[in-house]
Image (cartoon, grey):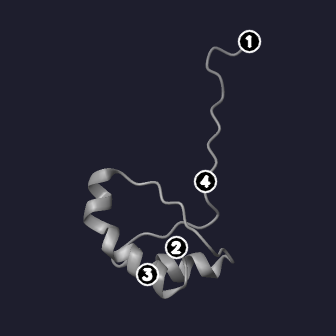
Amino acid sequence: MCKHPLRVYAGPSRYVQGPGAFLQIGPEIKKIGLQGKAFIVISKTAEKQTRSLWEKSLKEEGLD
């Protein structure tokens, strides 16, 4: 038996980051064909700092 078991991590097929990324979240979600409500996992601090940006982007694309 192996002393160190394998760990497997799955990640997204697309990963976007950089200046203005929160303003592009709506168009990026649309590009991959999603619609309706978005589920965002974010810390409370980051939410306070960025919520207005991603809410605007989602709304412009017709996403909740």
Q: Are marks 4 and 2 in contact (CB under 8 Å)?
A: no
Q: Is residue 39 visible?
A: yes
**Marks 4/2: CA–CA distance:** 23 Å
* Horizontal arrangement in the rendering, residue 19 relative to residue 24 (left or right): left
The disc placed on residue 10 is none
Front one among 56 and 23? 56
- Location of residue 7 with respect to 57 vertically, above or below: above
Residue, disc 1? 1
- Residue under the point 48% across and 78% down: 58
- Location of residue 60 with respect to 7 vertically, above or below: below
Residue type at tag 3 = Ser
- Location of residue 35 with respect to 8 vertically, above or below: below
Q: Are marks 4 and 1 in contact (CB under 8 Å)?
A: no
The disc placed on residue 64 is 2
- Say which label, 3 or 1, has the lower sequence index: 1
Residue, disc 4? 11
In front: label 4 or label 1: 4
Q: Position of residue 26 (x, y in %)?
A: 51, 79
